[in-house]
Amino acid sequence: MSALEPVTLTGDLVSLRPLALEDEEGLIEAVKDGELWRLWYTNIPEPGGMRAEIERRLTLQERGSMLPFTTRSLRDGRIIGMTSFMNIDASTPRVEIGSTWNAASAHGSGTNAESKLLLLTHAFEVWGCPAVELRTSWQNKQSRAAIEGLGAKLDGVLRQHSRTRDGSLRDTCVYSIVAAEWPQARSALRFRLGKDVLARG
């Protein structure tokens, strides 16, 4: 696994750039788009907690366990969300793609699918990961459908795994894509994005 240096990943719809403190204002505007922090089953930062969340992710980056990104739309240049490589195990190597959220207006636009394509390509084809993990709440049906749409398989459910912001316990679905499945998953994602582009005209 190559050195875990910040990297920019760019596609046709989005650019994933290293997270920085100066992204705070744009991220606050993005999280207000749909009031995403009100989703009880996930932990998306409130506007007032955005700086603390950025600092938390950058601290994990310094420790070598996370590479966080700011997601920007290439259509208008605006910040639409965050994502990351996390729980990095450089010795295997293995990573999780997670801590992801996008502005409500970006949902269904293909930006999330392309973000996942960029991250998965980097994990499998640059780092040589034998597997990439994705996790989400059992209650987050939209996220589960999106992950399954990537070709990921359900490894299991960690019951009563962690607490949400309101203090309730959540069951966490653990998915993965292994290297042997990556070519098919990559083709499916590329095909899906091609259809998205045609649909938008």
Image (cartoon, helix red, strand yellow):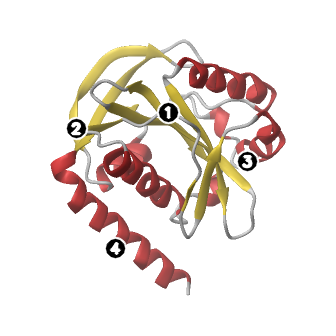
Residue hosting label 2: 154
Which mark's residue is nearer the viewer, 4 or 2? 4
**Which residue, given by chain and number where applicable, does mark 1 sit on?**
4
Query: Which numbered disc flags the more N-terminal residue, 1 or 2?
Result: 1
Mark 1, mark 3: which one is toward the viewer?
Answer: 1
Task: First in sequence, mark 1 or 4: give its number.
Answer: 1
Q: Position of residue 104 (x, y in %)?
A: 63, 53
69 to the left or right of 148: right
Mark 2 crowd level (few <14, some 14–19, many ≥20, 10 Å Cα)? some
Please name the amino acid that badge 1 sits on: Leu
Circle 3 sits on which residue?
A: 30
Where does residue 52 sit, x and y in percent of width and height?
Answer: 74, 21
Name the residue carrying label 4: 191
Q: Which residue is drawn at 42% across and 44% down?
A: 143
Image point (36%, 69%), residue name: 190
Q: Which of pointers 1 and 4 indicates the residue nearer the eye?
A: 1
Q: Upstream in the sequence, badge 4 or badge 3?
A: 3
User: How far separated are the C-alphas under marks 4 and 3?
Assistant: 28 Å
Mark pair 3, 2: CA separation: 30 Å
Secondary structure under tag 1 reads loop
CB of mark 3 within 8 Å of CB of mark 2?
Answer: no
* Eye-nearest disc, 1 or 2: 1
Q: Earlier in the sequence, mark 1 or mark 3?
A: 1
